[in-house]
Image (tube, rainbow, N blue to C red):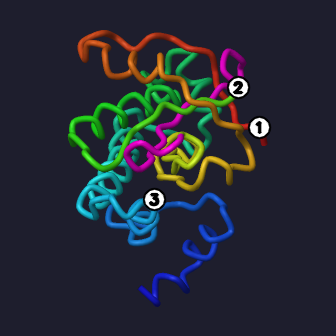
Amino acid sequence: MALIADTPAAKARQRSELVLATSAEDPVLRARLISLSSTVNPEEARRVTYVAYTTGRELAAKWDMVSSPTMQSFLINIGLRKGGYCYQFATELLRRLDAQKLKTLELHWAESDAGTDTEHNVIAVTAKGQPFEQAIMLDNWRRSGHLLWGPLTGDPDHTWQENKAAFVRGLGRNASTPDRPKRVTHSKK
């Protein structure tokens, strides 16, 4: 574990900044999830890391993501892309993580600037029973399929709130239902 503590990602995490996951087995993200509570199962933390990382990559390929999510949203709006909005990334990640039947980690829908054209949605993870504010954010949209993660409070671009209704909707939609159109979302930068 000493080697992990000296990596740039580990140092950034210690300063409460957001970092890009390095792989589907990212040891720093896994360790951060485990450190949420002594009750967190390390195997669950490994699965969450793997699913979050691979989901972003798979969806970016499926939706032919461009390097700017704002440009992707524009391309969707004019009909040149079929998907790639932030809520679509969040919904798919939520469903895949929910399928893991986690016992020691809990999933949350996090949103920033709800109802505006800068609205952004991600999935957040806490230890079972922990308050939302202690969550680790998992964002596959902002870096076009590359997993950005970190504490909710360490996000310089967004102030996150939990949306339990969106969480239920994300899990309850029928997989065959076409994706609903939504406003273009932008980072505050």
Residue under numbered circle 2: 113
Q: Residue at x 22, y 42 (%)?
A: 100
Q: Magenta residues?
A: 114-131
Of the numbered discs in the image, which one, if any, rests on residue 188? 1
Q: Vertical placement of 98 versus 17: above or below?
A: above
62 in magenta: no
Mark 3 surroundings: few (<14), some (14-19) or many (≥20) residues within 10 A: some
Q: Helix or strand or loop: what does disc 2 sit on?
A: loop
What x and y, as percent, mark residue 147? 47, 52
Of the numbered discs in the image, which one, if any, rests on residue 36? 3
Q: Is residue 171 left or right of residue 143?
A: left
Mark 2 surroundings: few (<14), some (14-19) or many (≥20) residues within 10 A: some
Q: Vertical placement of 177 versus 113: above or below?
A: above
Of the numbered discs in the image, which one, if any, rests on residue 83? none
Compare marks 3 and 1 and give the one earlier in the sequence: 3
Q: Is residue 174 left or right of residue 131?
A: left
Residue 168: image quadrant is top left
